[in-house]
Amino acid sequence: MSGARGLRWTMLAFGFALLYAPIALLVAYSFNASRLVTVWGGFSTRWYASLFANQQMMQSALTSLKIALLSALIATIAGSSAAYALARYGKFRTRALFSSMIYAPLVMPEVISGLSLLLLFVALGLDRGVATVVIAHASISMCFVAVVVYPRFASMDRSLEEAAMDLGAGPLRTFWTITLPLAAPAIISGFLLATTLSLDDLVIASFTSGPGSTTLPMRIYSQVRLGVTPEVNAISTLMIGFVATCLLLMALFGERRDAGAKAEPRATAARRRSSAG
């Protein structure tokens, strides 16, 4: 038994090392004083200072952040609306088709999605730029938001909404004061996930971007093709830190969502006991 447990721990440690050792190495070499990325020349933050003086890199970072926030906002609204429809409207006639169309982009290769979006923008006569990248990222990210938010709407205690309407609240007021606050942790988690997906995307942005809309992954990829520089390590480290912060916040909101879902049945049972008494 101890041998099997040791083997499991060894495989787990190997898996984590395979995943995170390259990232740790990249972060360490972002503080390298040497201009050569493969030769350690001592600790230094000179490349971070050089990075902030690089106007092209910083402009690409701001463009990526703007695209990520706008597309995540659109994706959160659309994905949450789709999840609400699936959870609350029962088995309507086109439910299977509607659900399949929402989840299909999750398994669609990014090359196909990017090419199809490019053909759509060309057919509509839209000039490629920030707007087309936002639309493209939002159309893909909304599927992930729907996956995250749907279980929350499906498991929500409907008696709270019914109690609010019994007390005179209309459907819209009930949604804003009861339903939306209860679903807020899942919605925020979906927003953070959509932001992370947009910041990470390279393939779809390559198809749908135009002059003045070069994202940070595209800028990094173009520079890496000519040779890795310490500035690339520095901006990659900052990007890793931002994405890790988003994932941490998403995990915290996910714990709040799970805690709220577990607390609702207990609160409902307590109300029933008090009413019965």
Image: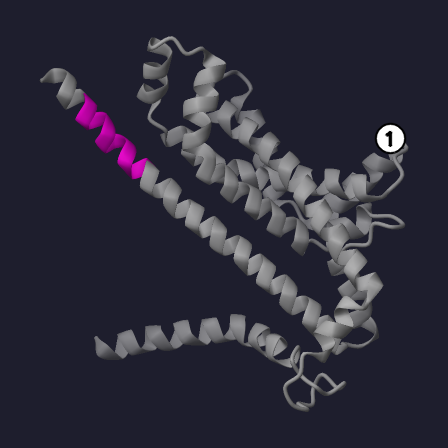
| Between 169 and 214, the one nearer to me in the picture | 169
Q: How is the image coloured?
A: one colour
Residues drawn in magenta? 261-271
| Quadrant where the C terminus is found in the figure | top left
Q: Is 81 contained in the magenta span?
A: no
Q: Vertically, is 60 above or below 93?
A: below
Is any atom of residue 90 visible in this view? no
Left or right of 208, for residue 68: left
Q: Vertically, is 150 above or below 194?
A: above
x, y percentage for residue 191?
56, 42
Left or right of 241, for residue 39: right
Location of residue 134 by image quarter: top right
x, y percentage for residue 234?
69, 72
**Residue that badge 1 annotates:** 124
**Could you tell me which residue is drawn at 34 percent across and 73 percent down?**
8
x, y percentage for residue 95?
52, 22
Instruction: Indicate the amino acid at tag 1.
Output: Leu
Q: Residues within 10 Å of mark 1 (few under 14, many from 20)?
A: few
- Given the current orientation, which residue lies at the most extreme left position? 277
Q: Secondary structure at mark 1?
A: helix
Q: Is 270 contained in the magenta span?
A: yes
Is any atom of residue 117 visible in this view? yes
x, y percentage for residue 7?
33, 77
Left or right of 179, for residue 214: right
Classified by dominant secondary structure, the portion drawn in magenta counts as: helix
**Could you tell me which residue is drawn at 73 percent across and 71 percent down?**
232
| Between 112 and 173, the one nearer to me in the picture | 173
| Between 180 and 135, the one nearer to me in the picture | 180
